[in-house]
Image: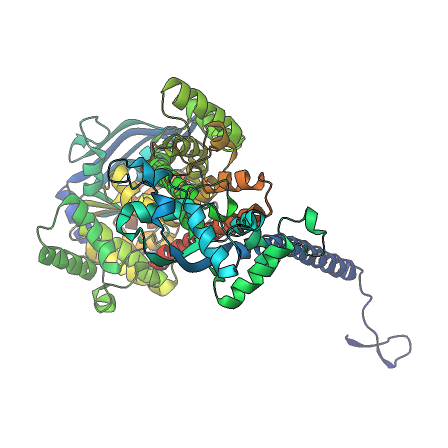
Amino acid sequence: MTEIVSQASGQLTSTAPARRDIGIRRRYAAERRFRFYGLAAIAFGLVFLFLLLWSVVGKGYTAFWQTELTLPITFSQEIIDPNNKRETDPKVLQAANYPVLVRNALAERLGVASSDRAALRQVSGLFSDSARVELRDMVISDPSIIGKTLPVTVLASANIDSAFKGQFDMTVDEGSRRVSDQQVAWMDQLVKDGVLAKGFNTGLFVNGNSSRPEAAGLGVALVGSLYLMGIVLVLSLPIGVAASIYLEEFAPKNRLTDLIEVNINNLAAVPSIVYGLLGLAVFINFAGLPRSAPLVGGLVLTLMTLPTIIIATRAALRAVPPSIRAAALGLGASKMQTTFHHVLPLAMPGILTGTIIGLAHALGETAPLLLIGMVAFVANVPATPLDPSTALPVQIYMWANEAERAFVERTSGAIIVLLVFLIIMNLGAILLRRRFERRW
Amino acid sequence: MNIMTEAATEELLEKKMNAVPLKMVGKDVSVYYGDKRALYDVNLNVRENTVTALIGPSGCGKSTFLRTLNRMNDTIDGCRVTGSITLDGDDVYDPSIDVVELRARVGMVFQKPNPFPKTIYENVAYGPRIHGLAKSKADLDLVVEHSLQKAGLWNEVKDRLQEGGTGLSGGQQQRLCIARAVAVSPEVILMDEPCSALDPIATAKVEELIHELRANFTIVIVTHSMQQAARVSQRTAMFHLGNLVEENDTDKMFTNPDDQRTQDYIMGRFG
């Protein structure tokens, strides 16, 4: 706003110079619109993330508690070893009818007559058949307990577990329900007596797979995934970093290296199931490695992770300023000294981030493992990477296909475990990055 | 422009009479980047314990020539050098010459200060360490101290040797780079526009330093600043479009050059 003297009138007037329309308003409007789109996109993403977590955690958190029955059980000789032949025939202790011990103890507690066969069958439905293995192991490890009465904790059956957690609709007609009114009444009575209670579900992390949901656990899958991660890390990090360093720092830039670069980029985009087929053909059919073994899974996932690590490492190496290389070379450092003393340390945060993201990707990978047979039902924790095993995502896939209500919460619980591992790995990536960058 | 005193001129002429030994000799040096030719048969001598300035407009090939002297051009893909460059009579491009050894004898300071992202101590100690020049930790400490003293940085950084080299000011960083080059005890130090990223005060310090270093080292410096060339050098070479136009004593070059193009460039008619 400049004040000028109007020549014509000779009066002092205040006239703003004619302002050009340079579209200020339009530009600001465009900016506001863009900000709104950005916020909307973030909100959209957050809503779906929240929905995902809500549904998984909402369904799955109960899987970390398991309904248990704690009561004194009499290891009666008449049931375990009626003919007193256990000294001569070890099969007796193996084959004894242990669930009857639990049933009798419960029947006594609930006041069910030993002649009421129908009621006894209902009592048997209260606890898990896994009690058979549990009691058998107790007796075999210490046969002197036969004839004694000891307090024992056994798992409640999956149906009682679900009913106790309120997952059954009790308004449904009794005939189409998986627990009877009588069982529910007993359940309430046992809760009152302090026999039936929820405890932390250590079995979820320790047990192998089982067709009985209450006894099914992630033990095998966790160990399998651990083996997989170990193998992938040990193989893909050195191979990937060595390949990247060679390609980036030493290899001449010619048509061959261009071709290799294009192929590595393409390999990163190859669907993972193709790697599974490759692994099946090469490692199992050709090399004769065992099926379902974490070793084969680890090799396949290594192939799948390598391009990711190579691309991340090359990007990290390329981001190191050329002046650092020039400085070291100018001092008379050899190419290798330049690379390992100066370039690699500077590229380390990027390499580690790329590696951990590649590992996290491999941890969540399912398809290639299905093809090499890691989708098997495995009850025993693998002792070596050559034993049959499953992995976390495969276990989730298998449980998601089960029909029982109790597997729903197990599936979600397993998803929570997997997500926690992924979050821990990503946090690790962030922390490592921070740590390495702060050093200089 | 005549900044040299008469006494100094006489001294220089006298030195010339005594034939200052030639440290490096470039003979018919041509450089190609792929198909593009960057240097045309350059013949240039670098005299011992002398500061030789390379001047000329941008893209004239002066930096290219500098980088052939310690084979830094080797790191550029598609770069080819013909002709011969000798260091004390040995051809530096001879297959029997190891490039690592050459660069330990011919050090370099770059246009932009490029200290390693490590401590000040580590920056200076790195060269002696990789070449095994110090036998013990105490030895290395001494080398670091002397190098920093020669670079005129010791008093400023002696209490913070373990701090990061990148935390220094631009001028200090450049002197740290000079200390780093000096620590290897090279015979020749190449400087590629060492002051172009520095303010005038830092520039003055570096120029003073170059003066002092001349006693122990042979220095070749590329510069864009005519005044700088006049201030720090005894010999000047003028490049234009990949050709060496003129090589002469600095005072002659800036007062009475032989070539018309040098005259024009110095007077600011092109470049």
Q: Which residue is situated farthest in the bottom direction here?
A: A12
B79, A106: nearer the viewer: A106
Res A142 seen here: no
**At 34% from the left edge and 29% from the top edge, which residue is drawn?**
B30
Left or right of residue A241: residue A406: right
Left or right of residue B18: residue A357: right
Is residue A113 placed above or below A245 in the rendered structure?
A: below
Which of the 4 image quarters holds residue A381? Answer: top left
A267, A337: nearer the viewer: A267
Residue A71: x %, y % from top left = 43, 60
Is residue B234 placed above or below A253 in the rendered structure?
A: below
Is residue B97 placed above or below B110 in the rendered structure?
A: above
Which of the 4 image quarters holds residue A5? Answer: bottom right
Indicate the quadrant containing the N terminus of chain B: top left, top right, bottom left or bottom right: bottom left
Q: Which residue is situated farthest in the top direction here?
A: A286
Left or right of residue A54: residue A357: left
**At 45% from the left edge and 41% from the top edge, which residue is drawn?**
A209
Scheme of image coloration: rainbow
Residue A374: x %, y % from top left = 45, 32
The tally of labels here is 0
Q: Which residue is situated farthest in the right direction here?
A: A9
Res A250 seen here: yes
Residue B251: x %, y % from top left = 29, 50
B103, A196: nearer the viewer: A196
Q: Which residue is situated farthest in the front direction here?
A: A115
Residue A382: x %, y % from top left = 35, 38
